[in-house]
Amino acid sequence: MELKLTDLDISEGFERLVLAEDASSGLRALICVHSTVLGPAAGGCRMWDYADDAEAIADVTRLARGMTYKNAMAGLGLGGGKSVIIGDARRDKTPAMMRAFGRAVDALKGMYYTAEDVGISPEDMAHAAAETRYAVGLSGASGDPSPWTAEGVFRCLRIGAAHVFGSDDLTGRRVLVQGLGHVGLSLAQKLHEAGAELIVTDIHAAALEEAKTRLGAEICAPDAVFEQRMDIFAPCALGGVLDEHSSAKLQARLVCGAANNQLTSPGIAEALRTRGITYLPDYVVNAGGIISVASEIHRTGDRWRRERLDGIAERVAEMLARASAEDRSTELIADEMVERMLREASAA
Ligand code: NAD
């Protein structure tokens, strides 16, 4: 049977939601295009064993909208979109399924560019890319995005430090890095080189030992993060780390890290602000990875990537200045900056 594409109803403010089904490979996927106002939509493909279609739709729409904001803020000339393949990545994924997914992406004729996300590797993307030129993040192209993400977070963290402490000199600043994965370890290395005192935590011991011996880091248990005294908190593990309880306990003056969706709700940014803690919105500071992927879409090189990283650092500085002047949270200011960009582009 042929690949079947069905346009589903979608809430106002979104452009398209497509269900892609391919019986021969078992593919069931959703592609959501939130906005193409600033350019073709771009965002990764996630494979997850959702409980039902409603859960998958809620996830893909939330993520697609998030990509519009991230791509806009990073000045990439790209809109926001995302896709999800419904299924267990370890059990169900096959090259034929990824090729069928590639055909689904191709049928959108460049309205959406896909790349890797949770459950999808560069090898999987290569199967999709055999069917479409709108699959990026391929081995041998823009490469691992993590070092770019770490570099972007590091630059923004310095700007945040200058705002909060009056100097971007990190010598002797206590920084807790939560999660020593691809991004966290690279960030910890940069912080060490800049003279910071590191506290690190992870659920796996190997990276912790490396950070201890090579970077002189202090190790803390994963569940003891909010008991630690620190100057800067850098969440680089999972989302949802800052909720009502943890944000009330956090002993830091600045939050800047790579993890997506760090706050359980937008109100947490305001709660942190009232406790004198500056939060740098995750989607702004962790855009280095998508900047790297965008360089593959636009076929640009290292210089372009570096200029975009400079751009996010400039936007963070602008956001902090406005947040202080207007006595509002950086999260609100960042969202407003993006919404203004979208309005101006739509009007133009
Ligand atoms: P990763 O999987 O390589 O690393 C995550 C690390 O966090 C792992 O070492 C894991 O053991 C650890 N971890 C998991 N649960 C933990 C817990 N409860 N406490 C402490 N440590 C825990 O992932 P990554 O690529 O380094 O990405 C880190 C975060 O940044 C993720 O939230 C990701 O979505 C986000 N992000 C990554 C990129 C990128 O370029 N890789 C870009 C944007 C955003």
Image (cartoon, rainbow, N blue to C red):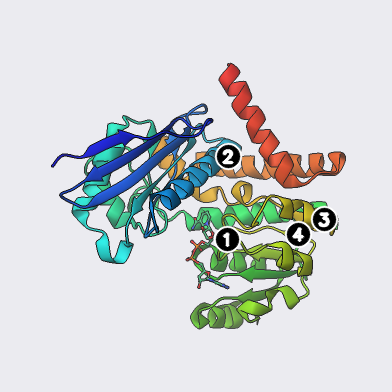
The amino acid marked with disc number 4 is Leu
Frontmost residue, 239 versus 310: 239
Q: Residues within 10 Å of mark 1 (few under 14, many from 20)?
A: some
Frontmost residue, 254 versus 244: 244
Q: Disc 1 or disc 4, which is closer to the eye?
A: 1
Q: Disc 2 or disc 3, which is closer to the eye?
A: 2
Where, quadrant-wise, is the N terminus in this rendering?
top left
Task: Give the mark, 2 or 4, whose residue is nearer the N terminus.
Answer: 2
Task: Give the mark, 3 or 4, whose residue is nearer the N terminus.
Answer: 3
Look at the numbered disc 1 and say if its residue's Cβ is closer than 8 Å to ligand 1. yes
Picture disc at residue 164: 3
The residue at which mark 4 appears reads as 254
Q: Quadrant of residue 242?
A: bottom right
Task: Give the mark, 1 or 4, whose residue is nearer the N terminus.
Answer: 1
Task: Give the mark, 1 or 3, whose residue is nearer the N terminus.
Answer: 3
Secondary structure of residue under mark 1: loop
State the CA–CA distance, disc 1 to disc 3. Answer: 24 Å
The amino acid marked with disc number 3 is Val
The residue at which mark 1 appears reads as 239
Tag count in the figure?
Answer: 4
Task: Give the mark, 2 or 1, whose residue is nearer the N terminus.
Answer: 2
Q: Residues within 10 Å of mark 4 (few under 14, many from 20)?
A: many
State the CA–CA distance, disc 1 to disc 4. Answer: 17 Å
Q: Looking at the picture, does residue 218 appear above or below residue 298?
A: below
State the CA–CA distance, disc 2 to disc 4. Answer: 22 Å
Where, quadrant-wise, is the C terminus in this rendering?
top right
The residue at which mark 2 appears reads as 69
Q: Position of residue 186 (x, y in %)?
A: 55, 65
Secondary structure of residue under mark 3: helix
Residue 299 visible? The answer is no
Q: Position of residue 176 (x, y in %)?
A: 68, 70
